[in-house]
Image (spheres, grey):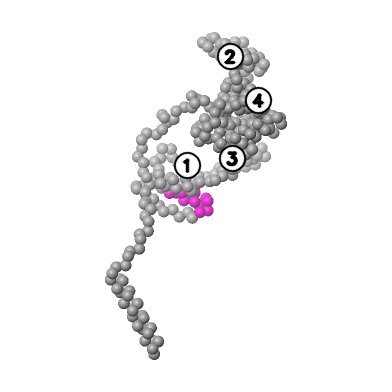
Amino acid sequence: MPRPLWTGAISFGLVTIPIKVVSATENHSISFHQYHREDMGRIRTRKVCEVDGKVLSQDEIGKGYEVAKDRTVPVTDEELDRMPLPTAKAIEIVAFVEADSIDPVRISDSYYLAVDGQVAAKPYTVLRRALERSEKVAVAKFAWHNRERLGLLRVREDAIVLHAMRWPDEIRSPETLAPRETELDEGEIERAVQLTDSMALDDISGFRDRYREALEELLAAKSEGKALPEAAGGEEEEPGKVMDLMAALNASVKAAKETRGEDATVHEMTPGKPRSRKKAAPAKKKTAAGKTAAAKKQSARKTAARKRTAS
């Protein structure tokens, strides 16, 4: 198990569940150092005091809040720890809501909550089962890194996951980002829906970080003195180029079907009204004349049959 990032308890009504918080994710990104191009010397960041120009170590650096120009109020870690905050060492559940009611844009980092000792096993399991049976998620408050945060608790397999969430006033409104009114074509919308169907997946666990793999190949080639991998070819679209949206959608649906090994036949659609899906016309009733002609043929066949029998 990864090293715990925080220890405390889940406060569930009058129930207390001792837990340890561990990160639910891993960062596999490749990081780079900065260096001096001339002599490959490493470039490091140093913390320097503006008053005396002295390079400071971490234990010489304190926190402060600027209340006015040239006036900073110092704040110590001890003062922050003594703040009367009920969630200082607890993840306090304050409500249970439907999962669909939480806007995903509010969700931040994810953590697993592990039991801290055998005494926590039973209440932990009870809370997990309650979340599963109610099909709800829990909204909680907790204090971490010197500030109170909002969190979301849900079940993943047999573990309870804590998602850190942003407060409502931390979410910017997208109102000014929405495009102006534009003329829509129902045929284009219908084709776009068909594209979503062609690209639908039940499981996305097979996706891989292609950029990181290519970067690893590049670094391996450079370290071993080999030729660098060639860039994949591809035409680049000119910025601002006006595209034929329906043609692009038709081509996208065809490509998606080919990728999935399906019949790539695509009935081209043109902008305008969407094609109506007409039902097959019911068979027409036989006319009176048709009925008479059929009866005469039936009578003639019977007469011929009797003559053959008599002979």
Answer few, some or many: residues within 10 Å of disc 1's Cα (few below 14, many 20 plus, some between 14 and 19): few
Q: Is residue 270 above or below residue 241?
A: below
> Which of 268/219 is in front?
268
Q: Could you tell me how far apart the alpha carbons at marks 2 and 1 are, in whole angstroms?
A: 50 Å
Outermost residue, bottom side: 311
Answer few, some or many: residues within 10 Å of disc 3's Cα (few below 14, many 20 plus, some between 14 and 19): few
Q: Earlier in the sequence, mark 3 or mark 4?
A: 4
The residue that disc 1 covers is 236
The residue that disc 2 covers is 64
The label shown at residue 209 is 3
Q: Amino acid at mark 1?
A: Glu
Q: Is residue 202 above or below residue 4?
A: below
Outermost residue, top side: 71
Disc nearest the viewer among 2 and 4: 4
Q: Is residue 291 above or below residue 162?
A: below
Q: Amino acid at mark 3?
A: Asp
The label shown at residue 13 is none
Q: Position of residue 102 (x, y in %)?
A: 51, 32
Disc nearest the viewer among 3 and 1: 3
Q: Is residue 28 above or below residue 202?
A: above
Q: Is residue 30 visible?
A: no
* Circles 2 and 1 in contact, beta carbons < 8 Å: no
* Quadrant of the image occupied by residue 45: top right
Residue segment shown in magenta: 250-262
* Circles 2 and 4 in contact, beta carbons < 8 Å: no
Q: Amino acid at mark 2?
A: Gly
Disc nearest the viewer among 3 and 4: 4
